[in-house]
């Protein structure tokens, strides 16, 4: 699970203290968001969508990143016995989403993670969410698992308060909703006290955010030599400013290096490169015979059909996540051909 830079969430913790399901509206934070074009709280830096798997209300494993990929994802940690924060957040979201055009509704995922698994059974979570919107996703895991997710986001973990004479208790938990846009990062948080008018203003704008970088045609070749293989992909810079790929990591490799194939004196050799530059609105193609990534110190044998999780770090866009499929070398020419059907040019 990826560790998030604490500085990116300082503003969230200042606005949303751990309380018995309560936090005051943050008017100053709303003003700051307005300056950035949003009424929520704009983060100092975007944070990537975390990776975790919990159990949904049907008893099936739910891979958060994979299942919400490409959608505006509103993540909230709460519990169904909450007296005010949780039902108010869910009711406000449901009312606003229901008023959006239907195509936009389908591009939003509301994910509720319980911090009270002892009382919140899958059936109880489903019934509670259905009272707001049956499309809302409910997830459940052990308290340790959920606390680990909260810690990875540098958010306070849940605190169970002392039960009363009837055995009922409140749970202290973060009261903000984290909005991950379709490009897989969060730029804005929404504390308790966010009004329906604020949601109605921000949701269409959050849906308009496009990724700064698009990674496609990502393939790793079946290794020709034991513990290493080549990785190829296409990068599109969707912004009006130049950017550069600085580094790559893959979950199966101990390290990765950017290389360029060159021919000198009739000899072919590989040279390391510090970065792969991408012009504003431009494209870079990493392909056989040109610039590519070498994955080294593989920790397992790779076979066709395997998938590798990648993290690409860019000078401006930051961390971009992608997946690469493992395919035989003989299939790469057709797989890496561009839309016009031409073979890879091997360069950028």
Image (cartoon, helix red, strand yellow):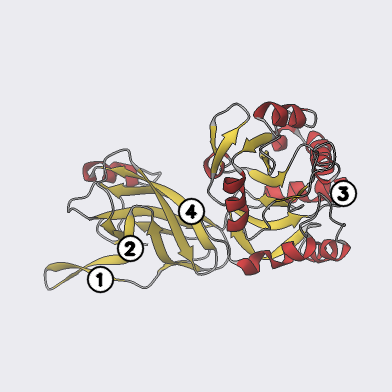
Rendered location of residue 133, percent (x, y): 76, 31
Q: Which mark is residue 321?
A: 4
Of the pair 56 and 239, the residue shown nearer to us: 56
Determine whether, in the image, residue 58 is placed left or right of residue 315: right
Residue under pointer 2: 255
Residue under pointer 1: 271
Reading the chain from its start, which is encountered first: label 3 or label 4?
Answer: 3
Reading the chain from its start, which is encountered first: label 1 or label 2?
Answer: 2
Q: Which mark is residue 77?
A: none
Secondary structure category for the residue under label 3: loop
Image quarter of residue 141: top right
Q: Which mark is residue 195?
A: 3
Residue 76 in sight: yes
Whole-angstrom CA distance, mark 1 to mark 2, is 16 Å
Secondary structure category for the residue under label 1: strand
Whole-angstrom CA distance, mark 3 to mark 2, is 47 Å
Determine whether, in the image, residue 248 is placed left or right of residue 316: left
Whole-angstrom CA distance, mark 3 to mark 4, is 33 Å
The vertical placement of 42 against 201, above or below, is below
Which is closer to the viewer, label 4 or label 1? Answer: 4
């Amino acid at each position: 699970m990826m560790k998030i830079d604490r500085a990116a969430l300082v503003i969230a913790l200042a606005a949303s203290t751990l309380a018995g399901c309560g936090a005051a509206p943050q008017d100053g934070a709303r003003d700051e968001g307005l300056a950035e074009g949003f009424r929520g709280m704009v983060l100092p830096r975007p944070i990537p969508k975390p990776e975790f798997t919990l159990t949904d209300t049907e008893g099936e494993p739910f891979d958060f990143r994979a299942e919400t990929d490409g959608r505006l994802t509103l993540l909230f940690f709460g519990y169904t016995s909450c007296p005010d924060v949780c039902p108010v957040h869910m009711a406000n979201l449901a009312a606003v989403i229901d008023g959006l055009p239907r195509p936009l509704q389908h591009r939003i995922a509301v994910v509720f993670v319980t911090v009270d698994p002892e009382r919140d059974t899958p059936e109880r979570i489903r019934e509670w969410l259905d009272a707001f919107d049956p499309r809302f996703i409910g997830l459940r895991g052990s308290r340790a698992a959920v606390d680990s997710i909260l810690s990875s986001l540098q958010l306070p973990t849940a605190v169970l308060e002392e039960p009363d004479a009837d055995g009922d208790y409140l749970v202290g938990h973060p009261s903000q909703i984290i909005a991950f846009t379709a490009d897989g990062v969060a730029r804005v948080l929404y504390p308790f006290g966010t009004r329906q008018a604020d949601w109605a203003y921000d949701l269409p704008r959050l849906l308009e955010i496009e990724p700064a970088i698009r990674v496609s045609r990502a393939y790793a070749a079946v290794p020709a030599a034991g513990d290493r293989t080549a990785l190829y992909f296409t990068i599109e810079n969707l912004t009006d400013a130049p950017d550069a790929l600085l580094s790559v990591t893959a979950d199966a490799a101990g390290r990765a290096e950017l290389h360029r194939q060159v021919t000198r004196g009739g000899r072919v050799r590989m040279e390391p490169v510090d970065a792969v530059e991408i012009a504003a609105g431009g494209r870079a193609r990493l392909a056989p015979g040109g610039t590519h990534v070498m994955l080294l110190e593989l920790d397992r044998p790779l076979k066709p059909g395997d998938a590798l999780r990648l993290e690409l770090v860019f000078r401006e866009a930051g961390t971009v996540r992608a997946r690469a499929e493992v395919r035989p070398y003989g299939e790469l020419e057709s797989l890496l051909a561009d839309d016009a059907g031409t073979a890879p040019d091997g360069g950028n």
